[in-house]
Amino acid sequence: MSRFAVVLLDVDGTLVHAGGAGRRSIERALEARCGPHDGALRALRLDGMTDRLIVREAMALLDHPWSDAACDGVLAEYLEHLRAEIDGPGYAVLPGVVALLEELAARAVPHGLCTGNLEEGARLKLARGGLDRFFEWGPTAIGGFAHDGEARDQIVEAALRRTAARLGWAIAPADALVVGDTPRDVEAAHAVGCQALAVATGRFSLDELAAAGADHLAPDLGDPAALRLMLGA
């Protein structure tokens, strides 16, 4: 039996590599909505950022006025581009992910997504690799997404609220494990009071993730110690 009441999983760099589909899609959306950017967005490092924060920082770089409505317009455009871009080259399901998700389902360990992606963006990225079937979707499903807030800790908080609503009892933050591949995942988990398992399948090394304060570390989600942590001995 898992030592955690719920396991909350990031998407990009943790479950899949989308082959740059997200960046290409957001750049195309920003160009359509805000005008040419002439490579100005290459300075943005997107790892661990929420979709709304990406748009805010991109608009600032482009000197484009910010508003929630403008952000919503860019993100709607982004999803349209992502539907095509996700079929591009470079996509990969990361090591150990399928086996882990199969075991979480088989052992009925509550789990969901905790990601800076829009919910539909997360679904598109996972569906390319056949992983969307391991998660429930919609307002009553366990999970936290970009529409829950610009700051990543707001997404963790939302995931805990939905977990409690779905399971029917209060979830203490210490009873939730947040799994991600960036220091932002670790920081957000700790801001809410959750433990963090960091995997080095994104752009950050184990040493960098350890320096960020991760409670648990693994090279990937096939690591036996990570599996024991999430599934129980």
Image (cartoon, rainbow, N blue to C red):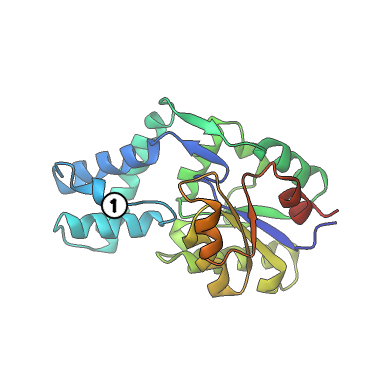
Would you name the residue on which mark 1 appears? 44
Nearest to the observer: residue 137 or residue 151: 151
Q: Residue shown at 58%/37% (left/top)?
A: 94
Residue 49 appears in which quarter of the rendering? bottom left
Q: In terms of depth relative to the viewer, which is nearer, 215 or 191?
A: 215
Give the residue at the far front of this rendering: 207
When the figure is inspected, residue 6 is found, relative to residue 231, above or below; the finding is below
Disc 1 residue type (three-letter): Leu
Above or below residue 99? Residue 11 is: below
Q: In which quarter of the image is residue 164?
A: bottom right
Q: Is mark 1 on a helix, strand or loop?
A: loop
Q: Is residue 178 left or right of residue 85?
A: right
Q: In this view, does 28 lie to the left or right of 166?
A: left
Please state which of residues 20 and 126 is positioned toward the viewer in this rendering: 20
Res. 109 visible in picture: no
Vertical side of 145 occupied by 31: above or below: above
Q: Where is residue 205 in the image (x, y as percent from the top left)?
A: 51, 50
One can see residue 157 in this view: yes
- Is 232 positioned to the left or the right of 45 in the image? right
Q: Position of residue 112 (x, y in %)?
A: 64, 53
Residue 27 in picture, x, y percent from top left: 26, 42
Residue positioned 72% across, 69% down in the render: 175
Local packing at callout 1 (Cα closer than 10 Å; few below 14, some 14-19, many 20+) is few
Query: Closest to the observer: 88 or 183?
Result: 183
Q: Count the numbered circles shown.
A: 1
Task: Assign the N terminus to one quadrant of the image.
Answer: bottom right
